[in-house]
Image (cartoon, rainbow, N blue to C red):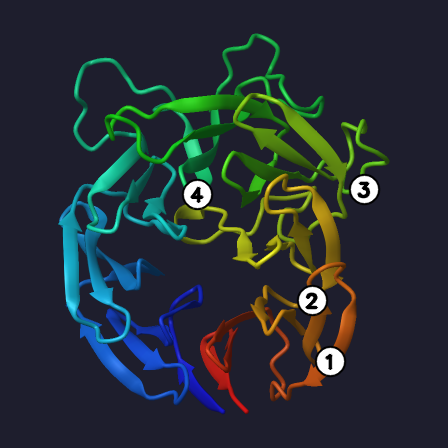
Amino acid sequence: MWRQRTTAPDLTTLEGTVVVTDGSTVSGVAAATGRTAWSYSRDVELCGVSGAWRRVVAVYRGEHGCGDVTSLDARSGEYRHTRAAIADDAVAMVRSLDSVGTVSPNRVELWRSDLVRTVEVGRRETPVNSEPQPGEDCVTDSALTRKGLLAVARDCPDTSGDGGSGTGDDAASPRTARHVALMKTAPSSASEPQVDHDFTVPAGAQLVGIAEDRAVIFVPGTGVPAKDAEDTTGSRFQVLAKDGSYTQYPAQPSTSVPADGPPATGPGGVFTPRTADMPHHMTWFDGTRVVAFDPATLRPDFTVDTIGTGAAMAGKLLLPVVNGIAVVDEGDGHTERIIPVDREGYEGTVTLQVQGSTVVEKRGDTVVGLTG
């Protein structure tokens, strides 16, 4: 077993490397040994870190917000690409296997592997004409991406005249309406998003999962589980498709998206759902349980009581639980056994990932590698 301290809010692992941060320094730690393989540091604030394309992506504060970005080889730390642009003062990271980007109240942007921007949503860095971009007057607080789809959740001035409509009757406020827009990650012009469909959704709804052609939101509603698929007041999932259709499923209340208060947010007030991709499911940790969604339809298949997100290993799901790691059947979600783990008094949320034969847990500001 090994351990490292980190100031990063999230756990990033790839290519046998665990990414840890200390102030403005980003380091790559070998998952198998816990030894630091490389470090990269700058004398400005580190705004966020993520990973894709076998690279670590570090976002630093520049002259105009958190817009200085550098990518490094995950194994060696060698420099790959950089970009500099105007950005907000605080940003959250968003990523998929194909894109990495940032989310802030004023804008969302994604980059491809050479860090060239593929899309910007909201306030544009350099307006190409005098016409405002649709949604430029909205406040964004969440985004998810997968393959060619970008989903953005935002509050916009209500122009419907009825406080909003769309996918639920508990929706609206007389001044703003909640929207989720499904759009392309790489439109023909990066500054002109191509929206497949824009949904008006119930108040308080948050993005919690995404597939190639649809996204799923959690609606807190009254804080009581919806009775059935027709219930528009209780807590529920709504699956929003690019073709404008939606389906609804009852859900248990969530402590991370409560009915009686704002959701738990990170940098810039952005809600970053704790999600993890499994071989046969997309998962979301709702604060007390992991919900497993079908990867194509995003239908909720099963839930498991946990203390954080997990990972797949040897055909099973490994999910952190209070007294150890649950080994879970990936087909139906039943727990086969519990591997005892002594977390030495730590009682908070655990993020679990796997690199090779090493199980990596993030416990607060400590990262632990479990081997053997």
Amino acid found under the numbered disc labelled 4? Thr
Residue for point 25% across, 31% down: 190
Which of the two labelled residues, at mark 3 and mark 2, occupies the earlier sequence position? 3
The answer for how far apart the CA atoms under marks 1 and 3 are is 30 Å
Element under label 4?
strand
| Marking on residue 306 | 2
Q: Which residue is mark 4?
A: 145
Amino acid found under the numbered disc labelled 1? Ile
Q: Which residue is mark 3?
A: 224
How many numbered marks, from 0 up? 4
Disc number lying in front (3 or 2): 2
Q: Quadrant of residue 35?
A: bottom left
Amino acid found under the numbered disc labelled 3? Val
- Residue 342 drawn at (x, y percent): 64, 88
Residue for point 76% across, 79% down: 337
Name the quadrant of the C terminus: bottom right
- Residue 118 drawn at (x, y percent): 26, 37
- Residue 269 drawn at (x, y percent): 44, 46
Q: Which residue is mark 1?
A: 338
Residue in front for this viewpoint, 141 or 185 = 185
Amino acid found under the numbered disc labelled 2? Thr
Disc number lying in front (3 or 4): 4
Which of the two labelled residues, at mark 2 and mark 1, occupies the earlier sequence position? 2
- Residue 44 drawn at (x, y percent): 18, 63
The answer for how far apart the CA atoms under marks 2 and 1 are is 12 Å
Residue 361 appears left or right of 300: left
